[in-house]
Image (tube, rainbow, N blue to C red):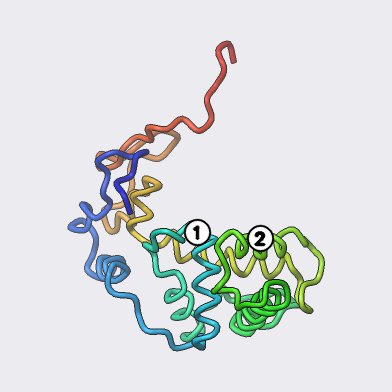
Amino acid sequence: MSAPARFPGFDVLGEVRHWDDTTAGVVLARLGPAAALHFFTPAEEAVGRALFDQLLGQCDERVVPILEMVDARLCEGETDGWHYHDMPEDGDAFRASFAALDEDANAKFGAPFAELERPIQADLIRAVQQLGQGMWHGLSADRVWSLWTRYACTAFYSHPLVWNEIGFGGPAYPRGYKNIGIDAREPWEVADTVDLDPVSPGE
């Protein structure tokens, strides 16, 4: 991942020495080699990897091993602790939705989802999102979309390289935070250099 433009010079890993050993171990482990898959089959791996790359914009540079992180959660039964009443358990829902993406890809384009060109993959994913509360292969489309994005975002934003991208100061444990409030930063934090919501003159 390239150096963050919005938070120049910021590197959350510079704060490792202030974390307790357990916290440091958990965070630094996320920088290690991706774990082997144990939950998803090879066919599901192909679909899931392509799907998550699309959802997180990692098609050109896969920085965070989303699929491996989701696989590890499902293998250990570390779900969100709930699921929609009209949906299968999360692991089964992933399997069913990955199979459905492959089914759509083969029916419409004569090839598995993972082998399609990226714009076509994006169109198939977008079609699921646009169904809203409609049904898709016997599943509620908005519930499927929630499942995909919840797990993908949880994995992505738990990674320290992504913390650098968003300017997150890290767990800061046991030191803690003392400067709480809008634009109140700790000494190790860096100001955002991009104004995402500019105010017009006179407002």
Q: Quadrant of the N terminus?
A: bottom left
Asked where in the image residue 116 lies, by quadrant, the reply is: bottom right
Residue 72 at what x, y percent from top left?
44, 80
Residue of label 1? 56
Residue 24 at what x, y percent from top left?
25, 65
171 or 43: nearer the viewer: 43
84 or 110: nearer the viewer: 110
Dot 1 surroundings within 10 Å: few (below 14), some, or many (20 or more)? some
Badge 2 amino acid: Asp
Q: Quadrant of the C terminus?
A: top right
The residue tagged with tag 2: helix, strand or loop?
Answer: helix
Badge 1 amino acid: Leu
Q: Nearer the viewer, mark 2 or mark 1?
A: 2
* Residue farthest toward the top in the current orientation of the protein: 202
Up the image or down, 177 lies above or below 153; here it is above
At a point 76% along the width and 71% down the height, the residue shown is 140
Dot 2 surroundings within 10 Å: few (below 14), some, or many (20 or more)? few
173 or 97: nearer the viewer: 97
Disc on the earlier residue, 2 or 1: 1
Up the image or down, 157 lies above or below 189; here it is below
* Residue farthest toward the right in the current orientation of the protein: 134
Residue 124 at what x, y percent from top left?
67, 65
Q: CA distance from mark 2 to mark 1?
A: 15 Å
Up the image or down, 191 lies above or below 55; here it is above
* Residue farthest toward the left in the current orientation of the protein: 17
76 or 125: nearer the viewer: 125
At a point 25% along the width and 70% down the height, the residue shown is 25
Number of the label disc, if any, that sits on residue 123: 2
